[in-house]
Amino acid sequence: MKKYNWLALALLAAQPAVADDMIQWWDASVTALHGSDYDLAPSDKQTTFTLETAGGWKYGDWFAFQDFIFFNNSNGESNTTYGELSPRFSLGKITGQEFKFGPITDVSVALTLEEGEGPVESFLYGMGLDFAIPYFTYFSLNTYRRDAISNGNLSDGWQLTPVFRMDFPVGDSAIVFDGFIDWVFASSNNSYEENLHINPQIKYDLGATIFGSQKKNKLLVGFEYDYWKNKYGVKGVDQNTYSVIAQYHF
């Protein structure tokens, strides 16, 4: 496991021990996901376990995840890993001034480190915008410049990433609709195609139904839809798949 894998896991484990005046809120979860019809993979079916953490701190916020991917019925490679570490530095928090322009509630310096096995390592840097939009629990839009790090990685260019969540009350429980979109465009390499990755999840708060309101947002089950046009920048490879998921928040 590479050093960045350990970095993501360290973030997950260390959050509660950080001084209260630095951490404003934090969340950690583990997700199990199983699906089929994956393209450019050693097997059609995959099972993935994801460790994920997000939070707000004195000078910004963070999001990090680590995927442990297992290929089912594969005669070759049996597993792999992939992860991202995404801190943002809020201009509003750092300066103590509000950066509000219409629906925009804050402006941040946005960074992301992508890592995994194979030629996937990249460093992204740019600007993040937070929006207050009716019916959305949160909505953020990050615009990045992509710089490939590992040899064979051709994804230099630009990336636009909206991230969102919506909560819909259902009796004593709720349905959560969240996800992200990655649009990689204006590539610096002609052999790397512009690609669009849409990855929403719809989940039911089963914990609140079974264990009561004290377990709200703890145990969620549902489905993930994954559409990836020109996956990995390969022209004509359009992934279109559904997966079942179970997610537990600590």
Image: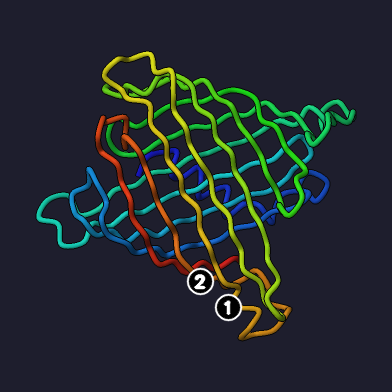
Q: Position of residue 199 (x, y in %)?
A: 46, 49
Q: Which residue is mark 2?
A: 221
139 relative to 32 in the view: left or right:
right
User: Would you call the spot at circle 1 few (<14 residues within 10 Å), some (14-19), or many (20 or more)?
Assistant: many
Q: Secondary structure at mark 2?
A: strand
Q: Position of residue 52 (x, y in %)?
A: 53, 53
Q: Based on the displayed image, in which of its 4 quarters is residue 75 positioned?
A: bottom left
Which residue is located at x 44 percent, y 66 percent?
245
Q: How many marks?
A: 2
Residue type (three-letter) at the residue carrying disc 1? Leu
Residue 50 drawn above or below residue 222: above
Which residue is located at x 29 percent, y 48 percent?
80
Residue type (three-letter) at the residue carrying disc 2? Val
Q: Secondary structure at mark 1?
A: helix
Q: Which residue is mark 1?
A: 206
Q: Separation of disc 1 and disc 2 at Cα? A: 7 Å
Q: Which quarter of the figure is the C terminus placed in?
A: bottom right
Q: Based on the displayed image, in which of its 4 quarters is residue 48 positioned?
A: bottom left
Disc on the earlier residue, 1 or 2: 1
Q: Position of residue 50 (x, y in %)?
A: 44, 56
